[in-house]
Image (cartoon, coloured by chain):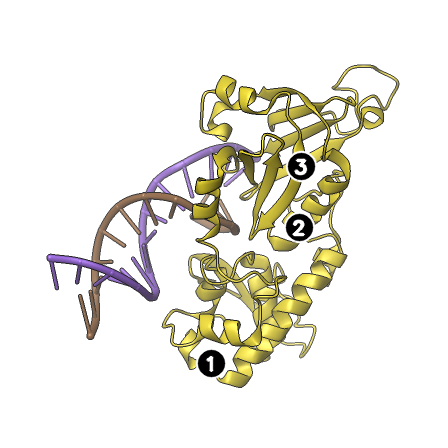
Chain colours: A yellow, B brown, C purple
Amino acid sequence: MPELPEVETIRRDLVGRILAKKITTVKVLSAKTVFSIPKKFVTHLVGQSFTGIDRVGKLLIFSLSDQKNFLLVHLKMTGQLIYLSKQGLVAGGHSLKKHNIFNLPDKSTRVYFVFSDGSHLFFNDQRRFGYLKIVEILELERIKSKYGIEPLSPNFTKANFRLAVKGRKKNIKALLLDQSLISGLGNIYVDEALFAAGIRPLRTASSLSFKEIDTLYGVIEVLIRRAIKHRGTTFNNYLDAQGQKGSFALKLKVYGRSKEECLKCGGEIKKVKVAGRGTHFCPHCQK
DNA sequence: CCTTGTGTTCTCCG
DNA sequence: CCGGAGAACACAAG
């Protein structure tokens, strides 16, 4: 379940490892994952290099050296991008893939890239919700325009956050999950932010006082930065670009802790369904 | 049956 | 009747 902190961790890892390397081979093992005839997808990429990696919300945007096309990668629920250097690939003394420490490619590998220095980038996705897509600048701008304010950007101001929340009738959990209003938060960080702010998930956005909105604004910023420092949350499936787990799961206060003791008051953490999602909260600490 | 991110579709309200 | 908001559904696979 990669959300903003996990996707950002992957982005930072990859920037230092794959930029400017020539793409020599692209293998598509699952046509559905690339939305097109695999051959067409491959010819867009082979011979080029990635010149930059950006992120909007949970979407990764790889710029291509043709200065025309972009590769979009969405991990959805179980997607992983794992980089292996030539050394990593041949760990164990064998010269072929399948002998690296991660045994990649494996049955969840949907696409992989080979670079001119022998390194590989694997896109693994157990549930096949994730995708890779080539787009031109116009389509990229259309997609980017659908995203709301980004918690790590200069646009994420108290005033803009108030504007996003103000006067909305839907509950605050659904609002925080809405990528067109605030981008990058998913189920885990929304539950954690609402606990930190002491606000119940079912409260309608319009019922929040300015003080509560400002508190929420503050805790989101801190939470996201802390989670990135810990290289994200591995609850089930998430791995960073080095194939490692993030450690922020150890810091979660409500997510995945239903029926356990609240770390603040000792009461019982409850789990209900809100906005169609499993929702964890403390009835005593959250009003 | 449960899990979740997002695009689409449906419904409601003014 | 239009537009926007919000809710519900579809998707996948363990």
Q: Is residue A50 above or below residue A44?
A: below
Looking at the picture, does residue A228 appear above or below residue A253? Answer: above
Q: Chain of mark 2?
A: A
* Corner quadrant of residue A168: bottom left
Q: Are marks 3 and 2 on the same chain?
A: yes
Residue at image coords 59%, 58%: A188
Q: Position of residue A41 (x, y in %)?
A: 52, 24
Residue corresponding to mark 2: A8
Depth check: A162 or A19 in front? A19
| Amino acid type, label 3 | Thr
Would you say the residues marked 1 and 2 are in contact, meaning their CB atoms lie under 8 Å apart? no
Q: Earlier in the sequence, mark 3 or mark 2?
A: 2
Are callouts 1 and 2 both on one chain?
yes
Residue appearing at x 68%, y 69% in the figure: A222
Q: Amino acid at mark 1?
A: Leu
Which amino acid type is marked by label 2? Answer: Glu
Q: Are marks 1 and 3 in contact (CB under 8 Å)?
A: no
Q: Are marks 1 and 3 on the same chain?
A: yes
Residue of label 1: A208
User: Residue A19 has which mark?
Assistant: none
Give the residue at the far front of this rendering: A67
Say which residue appears at 72% left-offset and 32% top-offset: A20
Q: Nearer the viewer, mark 1 or mark 2?
A: 2
**Label 3 belongs to which residue?**
A51
Foreground: A260 or A66? Answer: A66
Counting from the top left corner in percent of width and height, residue A15 is at 72, 41
| Residue A175 appears in the rendering | yes
- Badge 3: few (under 14), some or many (20 or more) residues near its Cα, within 10 Å? some
